[in-house]
Amino acid sequence: MKVLVTGGLGFIGSHTVVELQNEGFEVIIIDNLSNSSIDVLDKITSITGIKPDYHNIDLKEKLAVKIFFEHNKVDGIIHFAASKAVGESVQMPLEYYENNIGSLIYILQEMKSNNLNNFIFSSSCTVYGQADKLPITESAPIKPAESPYGNTKQIGEEIIKDATKISELKAIALRYFNPIGAHPSAKIGELPIGVPQNLIPFVVQTAAGIRKELSIFGSDYDTPDGTAVRDYIHVVDLAKAHIVALKRLLQNNNKAQFEIFNLGTGKGNSVLEVIKSFEKVTGKKVNYKLVDRRAGDITAAYADTNYANTELGWKTELSLDEALLSAWKWQETLQ
Ligand code: WQD
């Protein structure tokens, strides 16, 4: 079985390629290297012993996408390729809509033309905004997006749903909570460009002495210790969920043409709890200061995992401690 992974050299994409190859899938990667490095291709190869086929294509180029699909028949597509920085999307909304929506449309058009019907979409819990009820189920209402990035995920899901109505397309949207950590080999992991926006890369860079101290955004939230709560899921657990979802489509076990699953651990942890766990498992100190809240942040989000556990037959196996230790081991290779 041949699977196209767009954004396959990125953080979640590369970990998913490894798991696909571990499961015997033949993988083709499309990645324009806008938020990843070509070195990741060799790292994947060194982990699995199999070099994925790789194409440097910008999915915003409609003709390039058409030509690719004319020459490459695949059994399934996992679509990660997208711009994903919340703050940046506020500064560059048009680029975000062009990249995230344009690329999606061109891929779906070629899938329809070539009668390719198995599609996995990388979505995000950001579509829920601050949910009214915790833990968050897939039926929780979608809130008006707080950022153009979040809006591209909401719009993306709507586009896919509509596309399933005019074709044989079968699609699964996977709404990630907070992906963290790195492959146990420490050969692949998160590669933030510039100053990390996300918590864990900033924590590990602070522990490594690259950053002077971590600013904790907000300590007056309505949470046990006042700092915001998130559902931090190990990227390897997240990658494995993509294989399960893809097999569901390939084996025609899907119950509807468009399905949605929340992918999280089902447990929420505060920023201070994350720091405590990180210091415990690594023995490193994380200097931090409490500062004002970050605009657009929510108080708390963690997944209700029942639907993914029962219907998808998937659950997380790795702990927060393991994820944080793997992130540190990865950071040590970058020194
Ligand atoms: C986590 C917590 C911050 C940095 C975003 C996107 C989501 C997904 C993951 C792409 C929050 C706090 C962070 C720092 C801090 N992205 N924090 N100091 O905002 O939950 O989710 O990234 O798919 O779609 O919305 O993740 O890691 O930025 O923040 O205190 O230097 O850590 O306030 O409470 P977030 P995050």
Image (tube, helix red, strand yellow):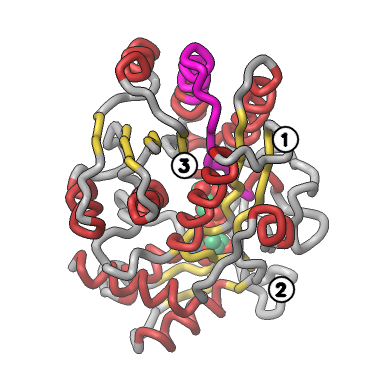
In the picture, the quarter occupied by the N terminus is top left
Q: Residue at x 57, y 32 (%)?
A: 152
CB at disc 2 and ligand 1 closer than 8 Å: no
Q: Amino acid at mark 2?
A: Thr
Q: Secondary structure at mark 2?
A: loop
Mark 1, residues whose alpha carbon is within 10 Å: few (<14), some, or many (≥20)?
A: few
CB at disc 3 and ligand 1 closer than 8 Å: yes
Residue 11 in sight in this render? no
Is 247 in front, or is 142? 247
- Horizontally, residue 134 falls left or right of residue 262, namely right
Which mark, residue 223?
Answer: 2
Please say whether residue 122 is one of the residues in the magenta stretch: yes
Image: magenta residue range: 104-125
Where in the figure is residue 270, as x and y percent of width and height?
60, 73
Marks 1 and 3, how far apart in space? 28 Å
Q: Residue at x 61, y 48 (%)?
A: 175
Contact, mark 2 vs mark 1 (Cβ under 8 Å) = no
Rendering quarter of residue 207: bottom left
Q: Secondary structure at mark 3?
A: loop
Where in the figure is residue 37, as x and y percent of width and height?
23, 45
Nearest to N terminus: mark 2 or mark 1: 2
- As displayed, is residue 291 above or below residue 296? below
Residue tagged 1:
256
Q: Amino acid at mark 3?
A: Lys
Residue tagged 3:
84
Q: Amino acid at mark 1?
A: Ala
Please say whether residue 103 is one of the residues in the magenta stretch: no
Q: Residue at x 49, y 84 (%)?
A: 276
Is 159 in front, or is 89? 159
Q: Secondary structure at mark 1?
A: loop
